[in-house]
Structure formats: C-alpha cells, structure tokens
Amino acid sequence: MLFIGACLIVACQYSGPEVGPPLIIPEGRMVLKFDNIAGNEDLVLDNKTYSNSFGEDLTISKFNYFVSNFKLLEEGGDSYTIPQDSSYFRIVEADPKTQTVILNGIPQGKYTGIEYIIGVDSLRSVSGIEKRGGALDPSGDMAGDGMYWAWTSGYIFVKLEGTSSKSSSSNGKFYYHIGFYGGFDSENKTVNNIKNVKINFAGEKAVVTGDSVPEVRLTADVLKVFNGPDPVSVEKNPGIMFDFTLSSGVANNYKSMFGFGEIKQNSLAK
Amino acid sequence: MDHGFFKVLKRTGLLPGMLILLMQVGISCSSGSGGNTEDPGPDPEPTNSTSLRWVKPAHFPDPVYDLTKNPLTVEGVLLGKFLFYDGILSRTNVIGCGTCHQQSSAFTHHGHELSHGVDDQLGTRNAPSVQNMAWNTSFFWDGNVHVLDSVPLNPIQNKVEMDETMDNILAKLRATPNTSTKVQVDYPKLFKAAYGTNEITSARVRKALSQFMMTMVSANSKYDYFVLGDAAALTTEEKTGMTLFKQKCSSCHAGELFTDVSYRNNGLPPIKIDDQGRYAVTKNESDRYKFKVPSLRNIALTAPYMHDGRFATLEQVLNHYSDNMQSSATLDDIFKSPTGKTGISLTSAEKQSIILFLRTLSDDQFVRSAELADPGVGNAF
C-alpha cells in the first residue's frame, strides 16, 4: 500500500505561499523554477515593449504552456523517468505559483540534465477523464487561461497573446494558440507539434539526497516563439491556431525556447 | 487548405440513438406523417417525418419566428444539427458553425475576443451567442439580417469566417457520403428523412439549420426557476442583486430575454478598427457606434464581452459602465445625467451584487444538453 501511495503522489505543483519542508522527507526532491524571459531580461506582461526579428513592437499579455513527461539525466548516463501520472504541468506567466514545480520521490543522485516535452503526449490527449485531472483538467476556465480545445483536438501546448502596433488584426492584438498531437487515430492525422527538450545543466549538478533539495531554474524565452527557423510576423499572421503549416512553424520556433538558468542547492531544506 | 483530418464517427447505428434522445427532452413528438398537414405554408413538402411540438417557456413572450412556415420535425432538427456542426459549410471543410459557437460557452467562442475562420484569419467582432434565436427580430451585432433563415449565409460567405458559397455547399452535400473527405455523413439520406426526397436545396439547408436553432432555447437557469415560482431558487444575496439589476440595467436588458433588441452606443472608446456598428448598415449619422443590446442569458459563460471582446470579466464590464464611458454625439441618453457625468452610478458592493445575480442566468441544462451537442462532425478550437 505504501508503495502504491508513493507512486501516485510523487509530484505536485507548488500550491501556496508557504511551502515548508515536510517533517520527513522519505525520498529525494527537486524543485524546477520555470522563469519566463524575453531575450536577456525577465518577462513583464503588458507593460513592457519588446520586438521580434522583423522589428515589430510587441507587448505580451498571456504566455502559458504545458510541459510534461520529465526525465532526469544522471551522472554516468543513467536516467530516471518521473512516473507519467505526476508529470504534467501547466505554466502560466500571470500565475507565479504555477511556475514552481516540485518533483517528489526521486532517487538520490547527482543529476546533470533534464528532458521533457512541450505539450501533452498523444496517449494522454486521447485518454479518459480519469487520466486528466490536475493541470490537465479540461473543465477549467477557458475564457481565462484555458488550454484545452475539444475531445479530438486536444490541448493547447503554447498560448501566447499580446498587442502590437504592427498587428493587422482589427484590435491590434495577436493570438497564437499552438497544439496538435498528431490526431486521435490513423484517419485523423494532424501535424504533431509536441517538441522534445533536453537541457544540460552546463556542467553543474543537481544533488538530490535526503536533506539536499536542488532548485533548478529553467528559462523560457518568449521571443524565441517569434524568432526561429520560421519567424512570426504579427502583421502577416496576427492569429495562428489550426493552420497546420503556420502552427508547426511556431512549434519549430518554440522547441528552442528553453535554456538552463542556475542550480541552487537546499532551496527547501532551510 | 483542406486538412481533412477530422473524420466523423461512423454513422451506423447512431441515428436511432439520437432520435430517442431527442424524444426524451422537453420537445414532445407526435407520430404521423408530418406536422404541417393543416398548414398551407409556402413550402409544404410530403414527408414521413415525425413532427416535433415546440414548447414556448411559460414566462417567455411569443416567438418571432413563424413555425407554421417551417414546422419542426425530429429529422429536420437532426439534419440541422449535423449541418450546424459540420465543417463542410466552409471552403476548407474545417470550420463549422459550432467551431465559433461552442455549446460549453453557451454557443460562443470561449476565450476568443475575435474568432478565427478559414486559414486562421481573424474576424473583427466577438462571436455572439446562438441561443433563443426564436425571439430575435434582427441578428448580428449590427442587425444586418432580419430573418433567421438567412443568418447562416453571413458566416458562410464571409471571407474570414467560412468563405464558401451555397452552391458549392450543395454540391458537396450531394456528393456525400464521400470517403475521401473522411466525413462519412450521408446527407442525401438525412435530407430524405427530413423532407421526403433527397433533393438538397439552399432553402432546405437553411430551414434545417433554423429548425435546429429553434431548439436552442435557454430557459432553465436558477433565475427561471425563481420566476416560475420557486422562491428558494435564488439566495437573498442574489435577490438583492436582481433588485439592483432591475434598477440599473433593465431599461436596456429588458424582459425575460434580457434585451430590448435595440441598438445603442454604450460609450466604448473606439479601438484601432473604429467599428461604427449599426451605422455601416443604415448610414444614419445617429447610428454611429451603436451595437445591438445583447441578451444577458448565460452571460457568466460567454466571456469575453462587448462586440469586440475587449472585456475579459463581468467586473471589467461593470467598471466600464460606472467609470470609463466615453461621451460622443451618439452616446445613449440613458447614460447621461444632468450633472454631465456619463455612466451608471454603481458602488463596488452593488457591482458584486449584480454579478451574483447575473450568474444565476447560467443554464446548465442548455450547455450540457446532449441533443444540442456535436454529433461527432465538429471541430472546436
């Protein structure tokens, strides 16, 4: 029974201002901080103007994404895969508590890197509602930060909205909602915009022991959603959602948006 | 671009199930050969369909739509439902009515200030709710259509919505079932069931869509239960909100439909596009910046708000009315006070109270009803 419990409750999203250490840490933990940036600076919503590679001015009002299926890379080439039921997180720039992810119950070790996917895998995208709790619950407020389309269409992996004087839309805004996991069966093929990410900790190590909880800061550069192999112009395409060509272009850009920030040891074991 | 990836569930065995579902709801059926035997409407067609009796909610006014000219049948409503959701109405075969009018948000486009049509092109206005269409004397934010049967032509022909022609839709429907499109619906069969022959015409398409839209009636909110006699359906706080609403809002959002179906300028500062609203239809100076007063039924489910979706929350909407109105030549008189101040005087507590009441207009049955749901042909993004 204990074993089953440990398997089920191995990760949770930071859910309050006081994340005190538990009295007993039966297994190792690692904290991931998703730090959204714009170029070299911290991302500021609404009140700061950036620009893309076309020189178009941009303010960002919404930047949300799913990350899932985490795997920790160990010194020496081994790896540890976080049990899948505990491996889905929705990061919302306007909601700081979503940006801290705690991986519980991971083996002690020295970790040198991490792998995950941007988006929600196809298997989970077609599974029943009992497999879609927490961050994947589709019943959330779609008018706000909702990240779910519909049964066959799946989740929105990356949602980026903002304003530009160059946008050709009637209200000066731009809307990029990128999803598509490949389609729910062979007759319903879509593009597959799930992207794999591998981040090496640049020679540093995240050391997990009973009383050592590393906090790994990962950066996500919103400007890389615009600037990449398929540069996005807000004048040419103020809205991208379900056009396969346009949407896979954005996905080819955002696959490179993550970077390694830093590691702090003992972040929770004060 | 025709992605063609959205296949339909195999239809076999689905239709009988749906007929049963339809018969279980508040619309009662009578057996027999068509419900229009005593009606000399202009388009009587011999059918073996099952007539559906459309029941007006007791507290609603009489409908505007003339059902004697398009009597509802089980088969006609079902056909209309398929047409409503099927992307076949668009040039790309992806965008259906239900793409931008999604049931879970009372048939609006949840979370979208503006909707995306074919090829991800953005429209200029927020998708209005498709509900209680039976009572509308005009349609769309600027009221440029007066007949329900003609409403679908606007989004069909709009270049950034469905960008299709009725002629081409008819040709595509006649060519079903078409395995190459992955959409396996047999429309000639559905038309035959609804109209007696498998002839597919513009009038039949539009009448079937109207039939389905006639069944999209929202009248089962907590507020409705209260009005119909259940005094406990609303809390004390909600009743306080209702009283305030009646004082402050109901001159325009009037009656059981919560709209007087008028066009008014409510002081929204023009944005980049400078949408002149009703003026574009009438060319009357007095109509500049006027838009239709929308129904408030299901308002808590239909964010964002206003003709351009500029407000994300009801709080923002009420803050606009209390503090942020922009005066202009056509600003509605109701917002002008002798002191020269514009807007509605509302305290924060009053706003919260009104919002509590507005939430009682949400109709769970309406947004969950299986007989209004996508039968498997739709694409919702």
Image (cartoon, rainbow, N blue to C red):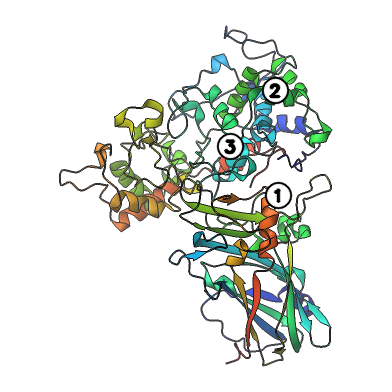
What residue does disc 3 label? Answer: B161
Which residue appears at 30% of the width and 52% of the height? B324
x, y (%) of residue B220?
51, 38
Q: Secondary structure at mark 1?
A: helix
x, y (%) of residue A106?
74, 82
Q: Secondary structure at mark 2?
A: helix
Q: What's under tag 2, amino acid-wise?
A: Leu
Same chain, marks 1 and 3? no
Q: What's under tag 3, amino acid-wise?
A: Glu
The foreground one among B133 and A52 is A52
Which chain's residue wears label 1? A
What residue does disc 1 label? Answer: A244
Quadrant of image for the N terminus of chain A: bottom right
What residue does disc 2 label? Answer: B170
x, y (%) of residue B74?
67, 24
Q: Residue A204 is drawn in which quadrant?
A: bottom right
Which chain's residue wears label 3? B
Which chain's residue wears label 2? B
